[in-house]
Amino acid sequence: MALVVPSILSADFTRLGEQVAEAQSGGADRLQIDVMDGRFVPNITVGPLVVEAVRRATTLPLEAHLMIVEPERYVADFAKAGADIIIVHQEASPHLHRTVEEIKRLGRRAGVAINPATPLASLQEILNDIDLVLCMTVDPGFGGQQFISGVLPKISRLRAMIEQHGAHCDLEVDGGIHAETAPLVVKAGANVLVAGSAVYGDKDGVAAGISRLRQAIGTPSE
């Protein structure tokens, strides 16, 4: 069963607590918080204080997706703020094993993300050490981007790689996920779907956005 993970990047920050509560009551499995530094990606978003605020507003598990340079310097801050899963980018982590081990030492689940053009070979030595691998389906930096369909075969290859290595990590996708693309990534092998605009931009509300995604992938709403 695929999980649905709304990204608060697309939420209305003037009423963030309400939007978080709407996602929880609407059946979200967990929430993602997109952390951008204006260096690794061309945008600046939020930091540990927002994770801390979201933590107070929900009992859902929280993912902190660190789209930042030198993520190893900040994983402890995000763990302390209440992130349950901390995701770092392979491209920004020259000592990836060390960073992953630090996340685990802090008692959090560790994830590694790769950009659309990053070869899967870069993950071979880390798959058995992580809890989640995130395959980006847009180039990170902004919400509301168009899904890169050329990544679909990569998702299928990544699923095969996970199975070949006997790894037990989730395969998450993020970027351009909505009712039309969600079935495609699930068919390719993803089991966790991050969606921002499709949830928080739904004309009928957050719960309706989550429900549409679940219907698209054949997962019943809670």
Image (cartoon, rainbow, N blue to C red):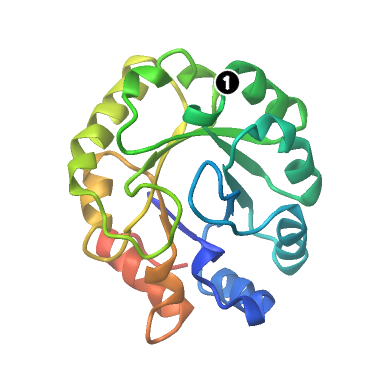
Q: Is residue 210 visible?
A: no
The quadrant holding residue 209 is: bottom left
* Lateral position of residue 211 relative to residue 93, left or right: left
At a point 49% along the width and 69% down the height, the residue shown is: 10
Secondary structure beneath label 1:
helix
The residue positioned 59% from the left and 41% from the top of the image is: 68
Q: How many marks?
A: 1
Task: Please give the name of the residue rendered at 41% of the width and 77% of the height, measured from the top-left corner.
Answer: 201
Percent from the top left, x then y, of residue 80?
81, 45
Please tell me which residue lies in front, 197 or 5: 197
Residue 25 horizontal side relative to residue 17, left or right: left
Vertical position of residue 52 compared to residue 135: above or below:
below
Q: Where residue 150 sits: x, y (%)?
A: 18, 42
Q: Residues within 10 Å of mark 1 (few under 14, many from 20)?
A: many
For the question of whether residue 206 can be seen, the reply is yes
Between 137 and 211, the residue placed more toward the observer is 137
Please determine whether, in this image, residue 192 is positioned above or below residue 25: above
Does residue 22 lie above or below 190 as drawn? below
* Residue picked out by circle 1: 96
Extreme bottom residue here? Answer: 204
Query: Which sits in the foreground, 193 or 149?
Result: 149
Q: Left or right of 104: which side holds 22?
A: left
Hey, what amino acid is under mark 1?
A: Leu
The image quadrant that residue 153 belongs to is top left
Residue appearing at x 52%, y 58% in the figure: 29
Q: Nearer the viewer, residue 138 or 33?
A: 138
- In x, y percent, where is residue 90? 49, 28
Relative to 73, 189 lies left or right: left
